[in-house]
Amino acid sequence: MKKWILLAGIIIVLMGCKKERLDVGNPDVERFVQQLKNGTFNLYERNEKGERLWLQTPRFGPEHIAALIALSKDTTHIQKFPTNPMSSRSPFPEGRNYFILGECLLWLVNGVRGASSLAPYLIDTSKGVNERYKGITSTEILMLSNRYRQWWSEYKNGDWKTNSALSGTSYIWM
């Protein structure tokens, strides 16, 4: 009897340790961000042989925009992020080999708007050509996070798809 109780206890513990997978079709923004931050986001598109191709981008919709923007003040450096598989360009600005979480979350908001770009980083076109492709700073990301927050507050019940948070700025997505 003790063996059965012990076995049942072990099974319950193992079931409780199951990794929480993100549902790509109905994603939880906070879970996605946590997985990005701790490096456990591992949902890959696979080929017919089951080999990994690229990280899948969760299917975020308008209902996720507020949460994505709210979390975009996080300037944590992350190593993995689902990028545009059609791009032949580096997913990083020149001289950088990491993603900045908040910048990536704003890129996802841009994608929900239907305004996709090839890489999840911004450049400031007011800078000289040699400087602009190095990307933007964490301070600029925080400023743009506020701009996106204001944009969403103004347009969430209106024409948010055609009005860009970056309109009137020198920032563009790559």
Image (cartoon, rainbow, N blue to C red):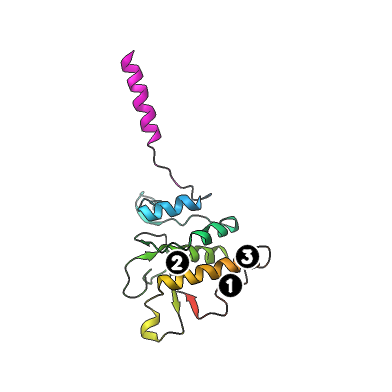
Disc 2 and disc 3: Cα gap in Å?
19 Å
Q: Which mark is residue 153?
A: 3
Span highlighted in magenta in the image: 1-22
Dot 1: within a 10 Å radius of its alpha carbon, few (fewer than 14), some, or many (20 or more) residues?
some
In this rendering, the label closer to the viewer, 2 or 3 = 3
Asked if residue 42 is among those painted magenta in the image, a careful observer would answer no
Above or below, 167 relative to 100: below
- Where disc 1 sits, the SS reads loop
Q: In what quadrant of the picture does the N terminus appear?
A: top left
Earlier sequence position, callout 1 versus callout 2: 2
Q: In what quadrant of the picture does the C terminus appear?
A: bottom left
Task: Kindly check if marks 2 and 3 are in contact, taking CB atoms under 8 A apart as contact.
Answer: no
Q: Which residue is mark 2?
A: 103
Is residue 44 left or right of 150 when viewed as pictured?
left
Q: Which mark is residue 36?
A: none
Q: Which mark is residue 164?
A: 1
Q: Amino acid at mark 2?
A: Glu
Earlier sequence position, callout 2 versus callout 3: 2
Q: Looking at this view, is 12 or 116 the one in front?
A: 12
Q: Position of residue 92 (x, y in %)?
A: 37, 70
